[in-house]
Amino acid sequence: MNTALEHRKSPGADNSLGTTPGETLGARLKEMMALHPRAPAAEHGRLTWLRNELEEVSGVKVSLETVRKWAADETIPRPSKLPALAKALDVDEAWLSLGRKPTLTLKETRHEVRSAQSASLYVAGILGMAGVNVAFADEKDESGTHMYAISSGYHVPVCVALAEEADATVTVSLDGVKGEQVTLAVLPRGRDTFLVFDVTQADFAPRGGHCAAVFTLEDGAVKQTGTDVVCPRVTNIGKIHKLGK
């Protein structure tokens, strides 16, 4: 392939100065290759792996030199190749290209915010009914904590996510990277029924701008796909200090 066809950086651009991890597209490529479960170590053909993934997953053929230049921020992939790159690395295309999550319409944004807030308020309401005091985290808190459960000697940071069920699988997505909090997934079942699962022990894979885990429902619990991790349904949330153990 003629790499001269790739978009080149502007003259004088220097990504060795003034950048932070993930700031450039090349940095994001390296980050997601390092985190991808099938990618080899950096010194053992990681760029070759990405070139092969592009062809196998999307039928896109590029040279190894082209992939090297992408990762080194010497060239930028054509827009037509970005969807294939995102698919090969299993990340959001907008995050890979721009370093942020996909832009949502106003309607979609309101729905997403309302759903996330509703899940947190639902958990907070159950905790309150169980006699547990709840303090909501500051809006500027970047740790992923949504609230703190406080009662007689314990102070538990809690992260709440709304789970989505489709095609016999349950997907739980979190903004950013999963922390050390007790992590609860609220799964709507019908109009008036909601199940809460303790997914603290699950492994959440980075998806670019957020992380996610996929489960199947099994006998009142959710089992993480491809692992032996079984996350129980929470039936006594008043004992939240015992969750995530």
Image (cartoon, rainbow, N blue to C red):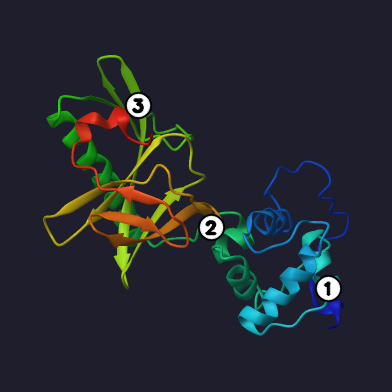
Task: State the image quarter where residue 127 is shown.
Answer: top left
Residue at 38 percent of width and 34 percent of height: 245
Number of on-image labels: 3
The disc label shown at residue 207, or none: 2
- Left/right placement of residue 113 relative to residue 195 reads right
Choose between 43 and 98: the one closer to the eye: 43
Give the x, y percent position of residue 161. 34, 48
**Cα separation between marks 1 and 2:** 24 Å
At mark 2, the secondary structure is loop
What type is the residue that disc 1 sits on?
Leu
Going from the N terminus, do you reach mark 3 or mark 2 first? 3
Do residues under tags 3 and 2 come within 8 Å of each other at their CB atoms?
no
Residue at 69 percent of width and 54 percent of height: 34
What type is the residue that disc 2 sits on?
Arg
| Residue corresponding to mark 3 | 156
Q: Nearer the viewer, mark 1 or mark 3?
A: 3
At mark 1, the secondary structure is helix
Give the x, y percent position of residue 145. 40, 34
Residue at 23 percent of width and 55 percent of height: 220
Give the x, y percent position of residue 15. 81, 50
